[in-house]
Amino acid sequence: MATRKRGKRAARGSSSPLAEYKSKRDFAKTREPEGRVAGSRGTKKKLHFVIQKHAASHLHFDFRLELDGVMKSWAVPKGPSYDPKVRRLAMQVEDHPIEYNTFEGTIPEGEYGGGTVMLWDRGTYEAENGGGLEALRDGYERGDLKILMHGKRMEGGWVLVRMRTDDRGRSQWLLIKHRDEFADPDYDVVGDETTSVTTGRSMEEIGTKSRRVWSSNRTPRKSAAAPSRKKRATRSKR
Ligand code: MN
């Protein structure tokens, strides 16, 4: 067990953090970004998160947190829950490039992850304890990552807890809402929010129109942005 960390670190040193991401994709066939590891953005820059709803062979939500130049990524089959008693399985997947944060469209059938990808939420996040980048790195390494999210649909405190890591280095985590003013066992965020946070499109609309959108304009439109979760929470919480 003690050798695992050392092995991982050695692997990281010998190849790009995005090597696995690139090896799984044929960029002549998919419109996903090839990407690169971003340089240091300093310790005071805000870190971004994105959640993509992905109708691949199984529908899931890709939960991505920017850390050290890449997007740490988890596949959450059922998506997040605002009920603090609910623990959602989050399977860690390969790091993605930061450029992936603007990807909405379709991945061709037969390619890795083939299916429709929707930008379901995005925003910034920080360490819940105010400890900054070091606290995030430490929490990630320890498998107890407590964060504050500032999105349209994801608000307040959440934690990712690592449960186990298999022989191939794949980790299973749990995504859990913290008890705070945003926690709400009656709010079905996944059921209620079914459109793109940037374009307002449904999965079906992205699936049928994305080819045209992506060939003509790579910048996601912002005109049809979804209403802020903050307003809803304020209303329901008095
Ligand atoms: Mn996915």
Image (cartoon, rainbow, N blue to C red):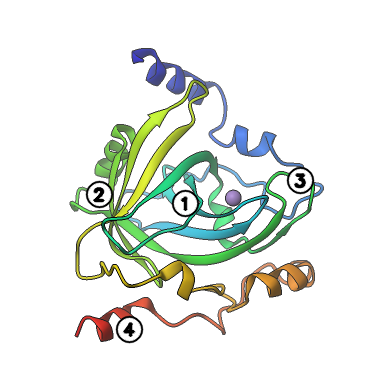
Q: Tell me the element at label 1.
A: strand
Q: Nearer the viewer, mark 1 or mark 2?
A: 1
Who comes first in sequence, dot 1 or dot 3?
Answer: 1
Label drawn at residue 231: 4
Label drawn at residue 64: 1
Give the residue drawn at x 47%, y 40%. Answer: 92
Q: CA distance from mark 4 to mark 2?
A: 27 Å
Give the residue drawn at x 54%, y 73%. Answer: 194
Q: CA distance from mark 1 to mark 3?
A: 21 Å
- Is the Cβ of the residue at disc 3 closer than 8 Å to that at disc 4? no
Q: CA distance from mark 3 to mark 2?
A: 38 Å
Percent position of residue 75, x then y? 51, 47
Label drawn at residue 233: none
How packed mark 3 is, by other alpha carbons closer than 10 Å (few <14, some 14-19, many 20 or more), is some
Q: Nearer the viewer, mark 1 or mark 3?
A: 3
Give the residue drawn at x 58%, y 79%. Answer: 200
Q: Which residue is mark 2?
A: 132
Who comes first in sequence, dot 1 or dot 2?
Answer: 1
- Is the Cβ of the residue at disc 1 closer than 8 Å to that at disc 2? no
Who comes first in sequence, dot 3 or dot 4?
Answer: 3
Looking at the picture, tell me which residue is in the foreground, 14 or 80.
80
The amino acid type of the residue labelled 1 equals: Arg
Q: Give the answer, above or below, for where 193 lies relative to 96.
A: below
Q: Which residue is mark 3?
A: 111
